[in-house]
Amino acid sequence: MSTEKTGFDIHSDENDAGPRPLFYGWYVVAAAFAVTFVGFGAAYSFSAFVDALQQEFSASRGAVSLVFSLAGFLYFSLGVVTGPLADRFGTRPMAIAGMVFVSAGLVLAGFADNLVHVYLAYGLGVGLGVGCSYVPSVGTVQRWFARRRGFASGLAVSGIGFGTLLMPILAALLIGTVGWRTAYISLGILSALVGITMALLFVNDPRSKGLAPDGGPALPATSSGASEGTELRVAVRSRPFLTLYFAGLIASFGLFVPFVHLVPFATDQGMSAGQGAFLLGMVGVGSTVGRFLLGNVADRIGRQLALILAFAGMGVTLLIWLVSDTLVPLAIFGLTFGTFYGGFVALMPALVMDYFGGRHISSIIGVLYTSVALGTLVGPTAAGYAYDLTQNYTLAIIGSIAANLVAAGAIVTLRKPGT
């Protein structure tokens, strides 16, 4: 009996002349993993720099938080431009340009003379860099897979989880040993070496290698596959798109508050900067688990139900942060919150593919993520100013809980694709 050929099996069967080569889609997944590792690792390491930047420039926590919010607004909003560019010109040049921007922004931040220079260097560099690379990367992965799309998408964006785990810890170590300026420069050099090299692996469409999604034989132009899909102008007027947009917008007001404020919250409670970075690393661990777990589970129970669980789970786990001020319960919060957050990141692009097909996937994801951009611009900065006003994070956490629960309720109203 011959084995089923899924594109993932590297073993030969009795009819094969030799071992089957690894399906190239997994190389595309590896490239997306590396690009998201570098881009979001650089972005989420910012929490480790908050105290150093406050002290260096005598700035409020709200003013420092705006650095991250500007970067987040840019990298989520730019997808509306970079998505169509990737659909037209290919993902590889966009991803390479993105990695150059990220690296340059980090290096230039290390030479900043004032907080405005950090806004320009880090905010523009990391914001433009992730904006150029993220949406094209995750969009391309969707084209290479059908049956295992949830798993492949989760694996690709698990780079965000690993970046969130490792980069803040590395940043805290570097800040403690060589100072925040050299830390930024070192992270910039590392980002260039890893990100640009791996971005060279991107190939936009499986048909260019004579393949179909999941590694089958190439489909004719009239067959269902990446060549079909809803036009952008039609998709953005549809009820499923508007529902996803609203959910992404409202959830993002609270979604990124822990990524900026968990480390300074920990140091406010008397913990070391290293312990704070460890807590953010737990978000990264959970995020990685969530991408695999909820991405894989979603292929069985349905991606809509899995996304509802992701939003509701983030809202519920934020209650742990609300009542915690010591290391162990905060680590539990980071791990559980990260798990549901990772599911959200993996599932949104896969749901877009389910509803609208692959032809304009990067363009549609790019427009969808402007919702996340707006929420990211407001949420972490508002949380910082709320802290400056009240000297605690109670208002910010309660607002984050409410936002995620409303988003979960919105996804409940979605109809299944094709109905």
Image (cartoon, rainbow, N blue to C red):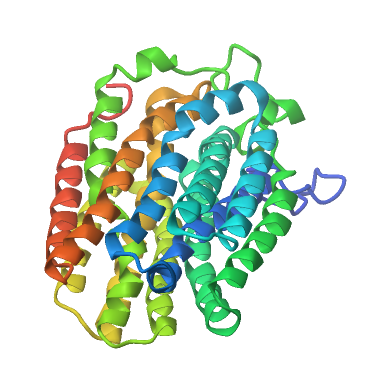
Q: 356 or 134, which lies in front? A: 134
Q: Is residue 340 left or right of residue 77?
A: left
Residue appearing at x 87%, y 45% in the figure: 17
- Tell me residue 359's x, y (percent): 53, 21
Residue 294 appears in view? no
Q: Quadrant of residue 199?
A: top right
Q: 336 or 379, which lies in front? A: 379
Q: Please identify the quadrant where the C terminus is shown.
A: top left
Above or below for 270 versus 229: below
Q: 105 or 211, which lies in front? A: 105
Above or below for 233 versus 367: above
Q: Is residue 1 left or right of residue 167?
A: right
Above or below for 312 versus 224: below
Residue appearing at x 69%, y 34% in the figure: 93
Residue appearing at x 39%, y 71% in the figure: 280
- Tell me residue 23's x, y (percent): 70, 44
Residue 366 appears in view? yes
Q: How many numbered marks does the figure carry?
A: 0
Q: Quadrant of residue 46?
A: bottom left
- For this orientation, the residue located farthest to the right is 17
